Image (cartoon, rainbow, N blue to C red):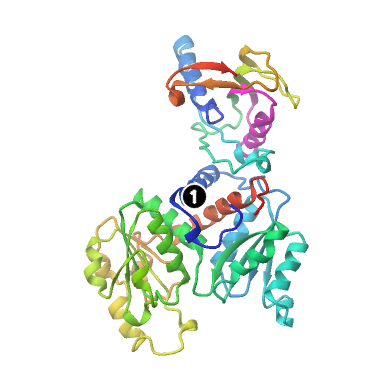
């Protein structure tokens, strides 16, 4: 694997192999005093973030450091980007400075793809850490790792993704990945928050959360992305919360074994009630924990093999 | 401690034999060394295997590493590095089923099933019931 840009590029075998690597890494590090592996010694990983992030950036940084790579963080605010340097020039600068891997987050859909095209000649790998409303593949992979851990398997499981589907890159990555892994995905959202063309996705669509709950193995809640909303997508936050928020009553409608996921950051009281977020049924902190191992696995698959000629 | 893949069942079998002959129960484990290899960038991505330490860890104990074939010695170097991150054994020894020569590092085995002189172009494959349906050593 040279780049990780989209879960659409992963078939079941490729996805499973990354998940298995993450599993093994997690077990290899369990209970160890020294959480440091020499695997990527001498490799340089740069995170290039044009949007804010806590967990993605931190977990990529920890992942790189636990594998002994040198990790450097570049953010748009503190770099020459604020002087007007283009994405292409910034990327070529990082590659020339010796980056083996650039992890990029950008508000424009397709930015990671463009970057991969520019950097392939330099032999630098690109990981998409979120591009606009397009994809966020490592988030989907860590969601799948968490589901596999909690449910034992993904094949044939019924998983609902609830909320702001329209603006979510997490959902696009998850739909492709979960379909490849054989899950049965249902999107639950008001019609205003569903994208055009959703009928061509490998999912079913519903507007009634309560009707779906009893048959679910897992529910994934999405943050309502106010920063990408320029218009009235629903009458009020309160009304959205009443129709689509996961509260304790709704949690009771789900089967005992069903788990609750949220990619974060959460808006407590909006899409998820505080009591649900803190309940043992929620796997939200597991997702963050698994995120580190999963991102270690991604770096391993990208950097720990011989050069490919692409 | 067996080094996956084929060292792992060999280590378990040795522990059973030791228990049979001497009545001493020897704890076993597996030690995956992939993340410590120095040749990761010389081939396609290697899948990781399981590491499981014996109950009580390895601190201040005698650890016998078990592998199927001893060749360049690089796997054992990686195993020694991996072991260091898991604890501080009293001593480390090495048991292999086949020593085929051609060492590239100053490493030797303490227990050898059979020394098999080979040429570099030959391939020594250890077959185990657990993986291959039968036991055997094949020289190709």
Where, by quadrant of the figure, is residue A267 drawn? bottom left
Image location of residue A309, percent across then percent down: 67, 51
**Is residue A272 visible from the viewing direction of this image?**
no
For image coordinates 56% across by 71% down, the residue present is A110
Where, by quadrant of the figure, is residue B119 drawn? top right
Q: Is residue B105 magenta?
A: no
Q: Is residue B74 magenta?
A: yes
Image location of residue A189, percent across then percent down: 33, 75
Image location of residue A302, percent across then percent down: 61, 52
Residue pointed to by mark 1:
A14
**Is residue B20 visible from the viewing direction of this image?**
yes
Residue A129 drawn above or below residue A2? below
Q: Is A107 positioned to the left or the right of A177 in the image?
A: right
Residue extending furthest toward the right = A97
Span shown in magenta: B68-92
For image coordinates 49% across by 47% down, the residue present is A17
Mark 1 neighbour density, 10 Å: few (under 14) some (14–19) many (20 or more)? some
Residue A99 drawn above or below residue A200? above
Image location of residue B121, percent across then percent down: 68, 22
Residue extending furthest toward the top = B21
| Quadrant of the snapshot with the C terminus of chain B | top right
| Quadrant of the snapshot with the N terminus of chain B | top right
For image coordinates 62% across by 34% down, the residue present is B83
Q: Nearer the viewer, residue A160 or B19?
A: A160
Residue A62 drawn above or below residue B139? below
Label 1 sits on a secondary structure element that is helix
């Amino acid at each position: 694997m040279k780049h990780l840009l989209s879960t659409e590029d992963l078939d079941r075998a490729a996805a499973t192999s990354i998940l298995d690597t993450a599993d093994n890494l997690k077990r290899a590090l369990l209970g160890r005093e020294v959480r440091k592996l020499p695997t990527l010694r001498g490799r340089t990983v740069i995170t290039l973030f044009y949007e804010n992030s806590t967990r993605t950036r931190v977990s990529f940084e920890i992942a790189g450091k636990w594998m002994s790579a040198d990790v450097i963080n570049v953010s748009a605010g503190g770099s020459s980007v604020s002087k007007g340097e283009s994405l292409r020039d910034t990327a070529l600068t990082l590659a020339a400075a010796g980056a083996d891997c650039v992890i990029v987050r950008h508000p424009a859909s397709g930015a990671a793809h463009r970057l991969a095209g520019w950097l392939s000649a330099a032999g630098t790998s690109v990981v998409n850490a979120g591009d606009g409303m397009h994809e966020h593949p490592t988030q989907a992979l860590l969601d799948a790792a968490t589901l596999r851990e909690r449910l034992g398997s993904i094949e044939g499981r019924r998983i609902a993704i609830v909320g702001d589907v329209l603006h979510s890159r997490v959902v696009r990555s998850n739909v492709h990945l979960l379909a490849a892994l054989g899950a049965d995905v249902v999107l639950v959202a008001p019609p205003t928050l569903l994208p055009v063309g959703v009928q061509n996705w490998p999912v079913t669509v519903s507007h009634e959360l309560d009707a779906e709950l009893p048959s679910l193995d897992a529910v994934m809640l999405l943050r309502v992305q106010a920063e990408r909303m320029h218009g009235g997508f629903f009458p009020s936050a309160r009304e959205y919360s009443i129709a689509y928020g996961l509260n304790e009553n709704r949690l009771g409608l789900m089967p005992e074994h069903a788990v609750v996921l949220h990619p974060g950051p959460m808006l407590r009281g909006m899409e998820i009630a505080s009591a649900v977020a803190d309940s043992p049924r929620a796997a939200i902190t597991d997702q963050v924990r698994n995120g580190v191992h999963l991102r270690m696995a991604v770096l391993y698959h990208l950097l720990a093999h011989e050069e490919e000629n692409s | 401690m067996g080094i996956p893949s084929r060292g792992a069942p060999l280590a378990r079998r040795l522990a059973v034999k030791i228990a049979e002959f001497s009545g001493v129960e020897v704890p076993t484990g597996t030690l995956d060394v992939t993340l410590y290899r120095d040749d990761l960038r010389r081939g396609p991505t290697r899948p990781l295997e399981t590491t499981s330490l014996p109950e009580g860890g390895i601190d201040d104990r005698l650890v016998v590493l078990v592998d199927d074939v001893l060749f360049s010695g690089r796997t054992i170097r990686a195993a020694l590095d991996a072991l260091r991150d898991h604890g501080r054994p009293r001593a480390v020894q090495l048991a292999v089923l086949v020593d085929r020569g051609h060492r590239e590092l100053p490493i030797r085995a303490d227990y050898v099933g059979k020394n098999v002189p080979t040429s570099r172009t030959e391939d020594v494959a250890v077959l185990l019931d657990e993986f291959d349906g039968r036991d055997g050593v094949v020289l190709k």
